[in-house]
Amino acid sequence: MQTENKTGTLYIVGTPIGNLGDFSPRAVEALACCDFIAAEDTRVTVKLLNRFEIKKPMVSYHEHNRKERGEQIAARIQGGESCCLVTDAGMPAVSDPGEELVDLCHNLNIPVSVVPGPCAFVSALALSGMSAKRFTFEGFLSGSKPRRKEHLEEVKNEKRTMCFYEAPHKLENTLKEMAEVFGDRRIAIVHEITKIHEEVIRTTLYKAAKDYENANLKGEYVIIVDGAPEEEKQEMTLEEAVRLAKRLIADGVGTSEAAKQTAKETGFKKSDIYKLLVD
């Protein structure tokens, strides 16, 4: 009698973003115990496996093969195998094609579990010392200049702290375009997180756009940008409040109601507005 295969599990495993000492014991155990590993770049992942003396078969899963390879991986898991999904550095499925594999597995009712690990933008935000009470992750900007500009225009009035990823060869232009769209704001440029030359440059957009001109850069960067400043409310005089009330009266609103509405909007006392309206 044939027994029905039990569905395996997809494990999302966070990997170090620089310092291999950040690889957790649970993550080592997950890679050592799974049936196979889906890696963004098998050449990068094999170095991690060798460091922890793990020998497991790997398949590549990346931006250019995600659809076909994702279906193959899901089929193997449905057949009873367990798979660890890893990216070159950090948390898979965060600004990463792994999100499509995770979504596919959920849609196929395949169990999905996470083994938490380092995440570059969260680490950079903590390092920056900038407000993390409310923030938004914007990931990588498009390589297309019109789409990149469109993205920046969409978030220029965002009040929360913003976190961006950027490649070294694009950093100069990105800083210039951010300065053009956002104006001069506080930023932090974070580089080489958890590595020997880890650095946090706290500066402003205008200064950074100048400082990084023609710079010879390497490695990935995280840019933390202050949210848009709160709009300052212009203070209205009592005479201006009365003029506002008179416009309401001209539109058919009663004197008492016009004074009430204007008082609510401007902060002046209803009695003061009413008194000037009837004098």
Image (tube, rainbow, N blue to C red):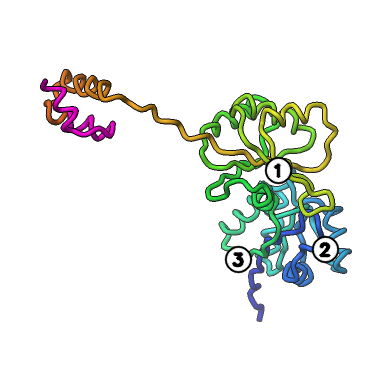
Q: Is residue 167 left or right of residue 153?
A: right
Question: Pointer 2: what residue?
Answer: 57
CA gap between label 1 and label 3 equals: 32 Å
Which is nearer the N-term, disc 2 or disc 3?
A: 2
Residue at 64% across, 48% down: 129
User: Considering only vertical position in the picture, is 10 above or below 251?
Assistant: below
Which is nearer the N-term, disc 2 or disc 1?
A: 2
- Label the magenta part by its dominant secondary structure: helix
CA gap between label 2 and label 1 equals: 32 Å
Report crowding for label 3: few under 14, some 14 to 19, many 20 or more residues within 10 A (C-alpha). Answer: some
130 or 14, nearer to the observer: 130
54 or 36, nearer to the observer: 54
Question: Pointer 1: what residue?
Answer: 222
Q: Provide residue 23's location: percent of width, then percent of height.
A: 77, 64
Q: Quadrant of the C terminus?
A: top left
Q: Nearer the viewer, mark 1 or mark 3?
A: 1
Kind of residue sitting beneath label 2: Pro
Q: Quadrant of the N terminus?
A: bottom right
Report crowding for label 2: few under 14, some 14 to 19, many 20 or more residues within 10 A (C-alpha). Answer: few
Q: Secondary structure at mark 2?
A: loop
Q: Provide residue 184's location: percent of width, then percent of height.
A: 62, 29
66 or 55, nearer to the observer: 55
Res 56 quadrant in image:
bottom right
User: Considering only vertical position in the picture, is 253 above or below 188?
Assistant: above
Report if residue 248 lies within the magenta region: no
Q: Nearer the viewer, mark 2 or mark 1?
A: 1
Residues in magenta?
259-279
Question: Pointer 3: what residue?
Answer: 111
209 or 63, nearer to the observer: 209
Which is nearer the N-term, disc 1 or disc 3?
A: 3
Q: Provide residue 201's location: percent of width, then percent of height.
A: 73, 41
